[in-house]
């Protein structure tokens, strides 16, 4: 493992699944059942049923319920209780979880806050590796000046160039002076992301943050016809391509 990957959840063994995660400030069962009802209504015309059921831990066992990973359409979504008021969300997309649309919509539907958290170490060298990204997006239950974004901060490498972006009113705990640092990638670092999340009540890169006291995770699973582009992947295959 390279130095800049230390401290990621499960030593980054479940990347790309856990490279991006969502969080909702509500219970796991409540979030999962509401998500299943939303998706079920959308997919019923295609003959697809959507059900939510509990799955046991520990964490890697619960994550295994997402396998196989799929391309073309996500078929499984996992909602995990934590040692906080927040529920964690990941899905089985073979290129990684896509938390933005689901968390933004569910925050409005459930009347709670939602988060998108991205932590990808920059390992790209000579055509191999990953472009780095540190992102935090906070969604609210009501519309704002931009959709329902409350706050967004990010430093990411888009094909070789680092960019820093922010939107919304800063939280009192933010390190505003750091945003003026000359090197763009240093304006929002992994340590800053962890500190901001700590202020919001989360420790998402610690394994014992999830599934406290043997509480189950909740798997939302779609059953029925698949799209023409449907493909299945093992985690190892996804990591090779990722």
Image (spheres, helix red, strand yellow):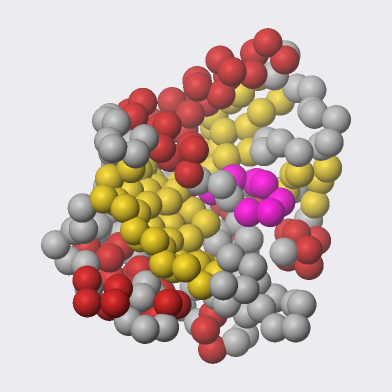
Could you say where residue 103 lies in the image, as x and y percent from the top left?
A: 43, 40
User: Which residue: 71% across, 36% down?
Assistant: 73
Q: Quadrant of the N terminus?
A: bottom right
Q: Is residue 138 above or below residue 119?
A: above
Magenta stretch: dominant secondary structure: loop
Front one among 41 and 211: 41
Front one among 178 and 190: 178
Q: Is residue 15 left or right of residue 206?
A: right
Q: Is residue 111 visible?
A: yes
Q: Is residue 165 left or right of residue 151?
A: right
Q: Residue furthest bottom?
A: 3
Q: Is residue 35 above or below residue 208?
A: above
Q: Quadrant of the C terminus?
A: bottom right
Q: Residue furthest top?
A: 45
Q: Is residue 153 left or right of residue 94?
A: left
Is residue 90 on the magenta stretch? yes
Q: Is residue 165 left or right of residue 169?
A: right
Could you say where residue 208 lies in the image, as x and y percent from the top left?
A: 40, 65
Is residue 32 on the magenta stretch? no
Q: Residue 201: name its quadrant.
A: bottom left
Could you say where residue 65 lies in the image, as x and y percent from the top left?
A: 64, 46
Q: Is residue 211 visible?
A: no
User: Which residue: 78% across, 63% down?
Assistant: 241
| Residue range corresponding to the magenta coloring | 89-96
Could you say where residue 28 lies in the image, as x and y percent from the top left?
A: 40, 39
Front one among 191 and 206: 191
User: Which residue: 54% across, 89% down?
Assistant: 3
């Amino acid at each position: 493992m390279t130095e800049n990957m230390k401290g990621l959840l499960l030593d980054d063994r479940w990347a790309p699944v856990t490279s991006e995660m969502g969080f909702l400030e509500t219970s796991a069962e409540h979030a999962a059942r509401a998500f299943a009802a939303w998706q079920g209504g959308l997919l019923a015309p295609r003959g697809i049923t959507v059900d939510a059921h509990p799955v046991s831990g520990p964490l890697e066992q619960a994550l295994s319920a997402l396998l196989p990973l799929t391309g073309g359409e996500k078929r499984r979504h996992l909602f995990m209780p934590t040692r906080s008021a927040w529920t964690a969300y990941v899905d089985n997309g073979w290129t990684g979880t896509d938390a933005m649309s689901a968390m933004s919509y569910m925050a409005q539907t459930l009347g709670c806050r939602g988060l998108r958290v991205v932590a990808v170490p920059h390992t790209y060298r000579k055509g191999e590796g990953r472009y780095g990204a540190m992102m935090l997006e906070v969604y609210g239950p009501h519309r704002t000046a931009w959709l329902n974004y409350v706050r967004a901060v990010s430093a990411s490498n888009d094909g070789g160039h680092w960019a820093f972006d922010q939107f919304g009113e800063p939280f009192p705990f933010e390190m505003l002076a750091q945003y003026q640092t000359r090197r763009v990638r240093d304006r929002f670092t992994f340590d800053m992301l962890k500190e901001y999340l700590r202020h919001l009540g989360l420790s998402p890169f610690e394994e014992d943050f999830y599934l406290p006291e043997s509480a189950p995770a909740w798997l939302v699973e779609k059953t029925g016809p698949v799209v023409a582009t449907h493909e299945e992947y093992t985690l190892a295959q996804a990591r090779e391509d990722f």
